[in-house]
């Protein structure tokens, strides 16, 4: 098909140029912030699994790896490819204890077993996390989550092939372009999602694990409590928003007063109550807002095209009083054909596919809260023993499935 469909240059898994891969029909590119980055299309030719597809998106080179093909006996081949970041699934990190590290140090550790370079890393402060028996892509996503950055792959091309692959970690992708979106009750083609159950009007804040002592001040092993900020916050280990309580709280048992909807946040690397209080207040500012997303064609935006990460002013006239808020483009799906049709999600999106953290990985990551000492350092013996115990138990549970019939 002529028109806006990009030219796809095909390489094998060894980066040897094969030629171009013709697209038969439409070409769909889907991308999310810190999540999915895929292409789907059909072709009369069949690429091999692991082939690398290079294409020019405006003035930006993109590289994807073929992960799945559907090949009917007669007809075109359906091709599904993911960002070449997915090759990091094959790079392994045995144990990396990142304690009080900068984002650059953490990013360096995550990319250490890979062939990817660092293009740029914003100063995102210091934090910490445990990477234990994980692939490098999981580690990269974890670094972005803990240091609160956003990942962009950078592909440089020279001499008709990829010269190098690198990663950017920015505090925030995109920019403010003056885009505005007005949501009306009868607007066609727009889907609004409101997740009001995630709204909290008060948050407990917890920091790093602290040693437990008896009445005489002697250390008692085997139990740890987490840092709180009640001593500097009028005896309360939580922060609250009274205005939000009137909107998003609930009645008490006697229906005589409105009470808060409580949540909690944990900052396992924080050892100072002042910083913990500040971080919890910042988290509350986000928690009191309803999680809203709008899926809409780009043509409905006032101001022009939208890039991933851009900030958009949203006016929701279907609410009384109307909602006026700013949101970001967190997902974009473009269909290349005779022209380019773009549909974006503004607001909140849940990462999918390989960006999702497995239950086992989440359990292992959560152990960081239990093995952090008062000085913020991970206790090596505790971290290794407890993690290995949890992993072993999980594997034992998996082994039991061998006796079941499917």
Image (spheres, rainbow, N blue to C red):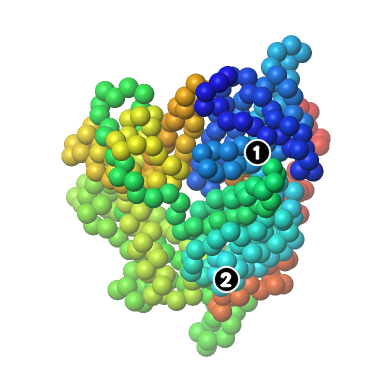
How far across and down, in percent of the image, does residue 78 sit? 67, 23
- The residue sitting at the bottom extreme is 216
At 53% across and 68% down in the image, what residue appears?
127
Residue 181: which quarter of the image?
top left
Question: Is 353 in front, or is 371?
Answer: 353
The secondary element bearing badge 2 is classed as: strand
The circle on residue 54 is 1
How far across and down, in percent of the image, does residue 25 sit? 59, 19
Q: Is residue 365 above or below residue 320?
A: below
At 61% across and 75% down in the image, what residue appears?
377
Disc 1 to disc 2, how far (Cα)?
35 Å
In the rendered structure, the answer to whether residue 112 lies left or right of residue 326 reads right
Question: Is 218 in front, or is 296?
Answer: 296
Quadrant location of the C terminus? top right
The secondary element bearing badge 1 is classed as: strand
The circle on residue 286 is none
At 69% across and 51% down in the image, what residue appears?
163
Which residue is disc 2 drawn over?
101
How far across and down, in percent of the image, does residue 291 sit? 37, 43
């Amino acid at each position: 098909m002529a028109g806006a469909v990009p030219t796809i240059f095909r390489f094998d898994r060894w980066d040897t140029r094969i030629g171009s891969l013709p697209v038969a029909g439409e070409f769909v590119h889907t991308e999310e912030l810190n999540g999915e980055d895929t292409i789907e299309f059909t072709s009369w030719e069949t690429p091999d699994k692991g082939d690398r597809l290079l294409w020019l998106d405006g003035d930006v080179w993109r590289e994807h790896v073929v992960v799945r093909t559907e090949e009917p006996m007669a007809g075109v081949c359906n091709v599904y490819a993911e960002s070449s970041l997915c090759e990091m699934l094959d790079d392994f990190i045995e144990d990396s204890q990142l304690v009080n590290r900068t984002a650059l140090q953490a990013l360096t550790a995550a990319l250490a077993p890979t062939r990817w370079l660092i293009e740029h890393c914003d100063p995102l402060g210091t934090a910490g996390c445990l990477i234990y028996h994980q692939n490098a892509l999981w580690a990269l996503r974890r670094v972005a989550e803990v240091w609160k950055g956003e990942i962009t792959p950078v592909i440089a091309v020279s001499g008709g092939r990829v010269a190098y692959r690198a990663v950017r970690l920015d505090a925030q992708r995109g920019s403010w372009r003056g885009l505005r979106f007005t949501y009306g009750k009868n607007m066609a083609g727009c889907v609004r999602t409101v997740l009001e159950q995630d709204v909290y009007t008060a948050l407990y804040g917890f920091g790093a694990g602290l040693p437990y002592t008896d009445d005489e001040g002697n250390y008692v092993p085997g139990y740890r409590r987490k840092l709180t900020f009640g001593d500097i916050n009028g005896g309360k280990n939580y922060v609250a928003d009274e205005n939000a309580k009137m909107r998003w709280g609930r009645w008490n048992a006697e229906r005589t007063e409105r009470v808060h909807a409580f949540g909690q946040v944990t900052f396992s690397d924080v050892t100072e109550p002042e910083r913990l209080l500040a971080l919890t207040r910042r988290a509350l500012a986000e928690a009191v807002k309803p999680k809203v997303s709008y899926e809409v064609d780009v043509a409905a935006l006032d101001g022009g095209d939208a890039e991933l990460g851009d900030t958009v002013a949203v006016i929701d006239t279907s609410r009384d009083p109307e909602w006026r808020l700013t949101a970001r483009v967190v997902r974009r799906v473009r269909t290349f054909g005779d022209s380019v049709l773009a549909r974006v999600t503004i607001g909140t999106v849940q990462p999918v596919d390989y960006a999702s953290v497995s239950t086992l990985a989440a359990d292992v990551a959560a152990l960081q809260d239990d093995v952090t000492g008062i000085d913020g350092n991970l206790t090596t013996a505790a971290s290794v023993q407890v993690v290995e115990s949890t992993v072993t138990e999980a594997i034992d549970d998996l082994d039991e499935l061998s006796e079941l019939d499917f």
